[in-house]
Amino acid sequence: MAESLSRLSPEQVDHFRQQGYLLPVNVLTPAEVDETIAAYRTYRTVTDRAGGLLKRRWNYPKIHLVARWADTLVHHPRLLAIATSLVGPDLLVWSTNLFVRAGHSNSRLAWHQDAPYFGWEGADGNVVRIWLALTRTSRRNGTMLYCRRSHEAGLVRHDFVNRTLAGLMQGEQADYDVRDEDVVAVEIEAGQASLHQPTTVHSSGPSSTDEERICFAVDYLAPSIRPLHGPDSALLVQGEDRYRHFLPERRPTTDFSPDALRDFRTAVLMRDERLSKVMQVIHAERAAERVGGI
Ligand code: NI
């Protein structure tokens, strides 16, 4: 129990910095897992029935603005202690995400980094994604795979796997040579977490089991990070924000309150607009490269 509220050890911090990931890290008790899954199931029912933006964006990136179970998790003392070990005492939550894979799902994600389209300045060493398993994860249920030390390459170019429908569904692929001996499977128990950096190359596979895989991921940022190409927002969860690079978000007082829903819509649309500009800029730079090559 002492471990559950404590920071990471110096060895764990070194591992994260040198390898680009760290696992497993104990976070939730079995009772907390059960409580969170029950709240998640209600959340899914409500968002599905609500339709509109809530239904389209139930899985990312601002769950913490409308659902108190997510707000509770991002303020969980153990998660804050882990993030403090890696990012420092002042902490923003920029996004919350649910990664759910049904049993026998064929979906998979190509090898990629999370950061290329985030449009951040000063992110190096100032971000951690905590990927929290609410069910156990294994290669058989299509868990995430890391390529160790891949973060050392910095931001790498991404392109679609290929133009077939399956290729598009797998998303964009990092131009990075993943060797089999460098692949690490995130095989952890419910209530444990795995941590990675925004430049760590990772992927996920199909599921060959009946199990549903449910994971909740939080991005903790130092407030010194600057979002590029437009305004964005984040929730201050610990310490203070002396930079004000992100517009402040408010915690929900009740689930799906009118204020919370308004904040959710504003935050999601603002972020979408900025990230679409980031993407336009990257594609314009690529077009310029191609023209320059003629
Ligand atoms: Ni990813």
Image (spheres, rainbow, N blue to C red):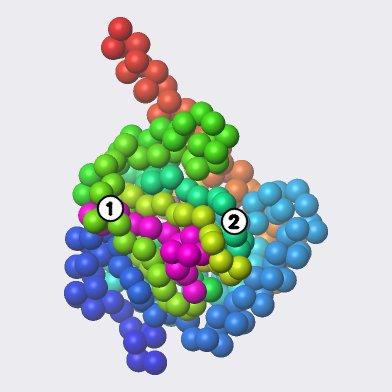
Residue at the farthest top position: 294
Towards the viewer: 254 or 166: 166
Residue that badge 1 annotates: 180
**Image location (x, y in percent) of residue 69:** 61, 73
Tell me the magenta residue range: 136-150
- In this view, 60 is above or below 41: above
**Image location (x, y in percent) of residue 64:** 58, 64
Towards the viewer: 250 or 281: 281
Q: Residue at x 60, y 63 (%)?
A: 103
Find residue 89 and report its image quarter.
bottom left
Residue at the farthest bottom position: 1
Residue that badge 2 annotates: 105
Is 137 inside the magenta-drawn segment? yes
Quarter of the image that includes the N terminus: bottom left
Tell me the amino acid under the disc marked 1. Asp
Tell me the amino acid under the disc marked 2. Ser
Q: Residue at x 75, y 58 (%)?
A: 48
Q: Residue at x 39, y 18 (%)?
A: 287
Residue 236 visible to the viewer:
no
Q: Earlier in the sequence, mark 1 or mark 2?
A: 2
Towards the viewer: 9 or 202: 202
Label 1 element class: helix
Question: Taking 170 as reference, is 228 left or right?
Answer: left
